[in-house]
Structure formats: C-alpha cells, structure tokens
Amino acid sequence: MLLDKNGVRTHIPIGSVACLMLEPGSRVSHAAVALASRVGCLLIWVGEAGVRLYSAGQPGGARSDRLLYQAKLALDDEARLKVVRKMYDFRFDEEVPSSYNVEQLRGMEGARVKKMYELLAKRYGIDWKGRKYDSSKWGSGDLPNRCLSSATACLYGVTEAGILAAGYAPAIGFVHTGKPLSFVYDIADLFKFETVVPVAFRVAAQNPNDPEGAVRRACRDAFRETKLLRNIIPTIEEILAAGCISLPEAAPDALQPAIPEEEGIGDVGHRH
C-alpha cells in the first residue's frame, strides 16, 4: 500500500510480498521500521505518487522465489525471447515475426518508437527534431527533450517502486541488459507512450517557466488518475508468464506476508 502525508492509504495487490510506500511528509518510528524488517515488509520512500524512488529498506521483502524466477527466465535464451516478444506484442499490439531474434526486435522497436514520437509531437503541435540529449547534462536538449527526460525520470521512479514491491530485481532485464535499472527500462517502456510522453509534449507546448517541475507535477496527477502503480505489478506477472517457466514454490521456512491479502466474502461479484 502507498501511504501519503495525510495518512491516506492506497492498497496495491502484490501477491506474497508486503510493502509500504511512503510519500513525502510520512513519519515512521524506529520501532516500526525494525518490525517491518523482522517480518519482511518492504519499505520504500518515494516522491508524490511514486514519481521518484529515494530509498528502499530490505529490497525484495526478504524473499528469493521471484528473484530466482526472474533470473531463470533471463538466463534461458528461449524463455527470454518469449518474454521479449510478449513485451513487443504488449506495446505495439501487432504480430511479431516468429523468426526475429532479440536484436531484430530491438531494430523493429526503434523504427516504431521514432514514428510514435513524431505522431504525438504533431498532435500537440511540437517542433520535434528527434530524441537528442546528453544524459550527463540534465539541462541539455531543447524544451521537448528536457520535458521528456523529466517525464521518463518520473516513470522510472514509480516503475522501480513497483518492481521492488513485487519482489523482483531492477537490474535483471530482458530487452535492456547490463545496467542497474535494466528491468525498470523494460517495464517502463510498456507504459511510456500512453502515460508520460503525452504529458511531456503537452507541457512543452505550454512553454512554462519551470518545465521540469511542471512535468513532474503533471506526471504525479496522471499516475494517480490512471492508477499506474496498481497496474504495473499485474503487467509484470503477465509479461514474465510468457516465458513458460513455472514460478518456483517458496521455501517452507520463508517469511510469510506481513500484511496478507484480505479474504473476501463469497465469490467475485458477491453482494453484501
């Protein structure tokens, strides 16, 4: 669940892992943190609506079953290709050639992403010259690129929070590899063009005095309105299931959820 500065809680279904995401203004006692650590409850300090991830205590909630599952999928060439194909099917909603390998799929992605940027820029009246920026210099690039960089930073924050909450490793990616946030980039790309890219271009079209701040606030509102964090974890499960490898059973002595899912009354749709 996500706990904001007013104590308002938003429940996030995360299977067998318990998690609290703390927004700015939250106060947590030493005793509460110690208890969370003992029972395997993951604490994540985030920005408003998860637009930044500042720190995480005991990543993975003291469970290894999902880490092993993710690593097994990534190390199996056939399973990895199935996961990558599922990601592209999810993003582009079109049939992926069965003969394509990961490198060919990356090439296909590049062409389609370029076209999607162009279409969205035209929709918002943006003078788009392509995705050009220097990652070592935050203020580099023209206004649309600066807005995009700010927006994707917000998306990476909420995505990493979701990945950690679900018990997976941000570094073990499938399309992206070799970086500390490879899996974050993989999952963020699934939502980028329906969330933060439109926000970035809309803000850029308004030419605000503080574009980075305006984008951050707009992303915060968009994440809350679309309940993005609630959708990230089920999407991860769906994508990884395409690898056709069974999730390993938890060890008999594994820590159980500190905050188990509440049992409903009757079947789905039951009226009280």
Image: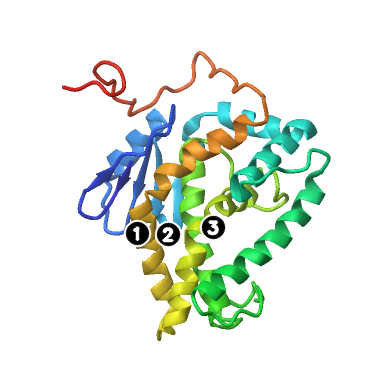
Q: Residue at x 35, y 28 (%)?
A: 258
Disc number at residue 48? 1
Q: What residue lies at 58% left-to-right and 76% top-to-bottom? A: 145
- Could you say where residue 52 lies in the image, as x and y percent from the top left? 44, 59
Q: Nearer the viewer, residue 236 or 58?
A: 236
Residue carrying label 3: 192
Disc 2 marks which amino acid? Val
Quarter of the image holding residue 140? bottom right
Q: Secondary structure at mark 3?
A: helix
Measured along the vertical axis of the image, is residue 63 above or below residue 209? above
Dot 2: element: loop
Rendering coords of residue 72 (x, y %): 70, 30
> Disc 1 versus disc 3: distance between alpha carbons?
19 Å
Q: State which quarter of the image contains the C terminus.
A: top left
- Front-most of 63 and 34? 63
Q: For mark 2, what is the residue?
A: 51
**Between discs 1 and 3, the one toward the N terminus:** 1
Q: Amino acid at mark 3?
A: Lys
Q: From this viewpoint, is residue 58 visible?
A: no
The image shows residue 7 at horizontal and vertical percentages of 21, 49
Residue furthest to the left in view is 272
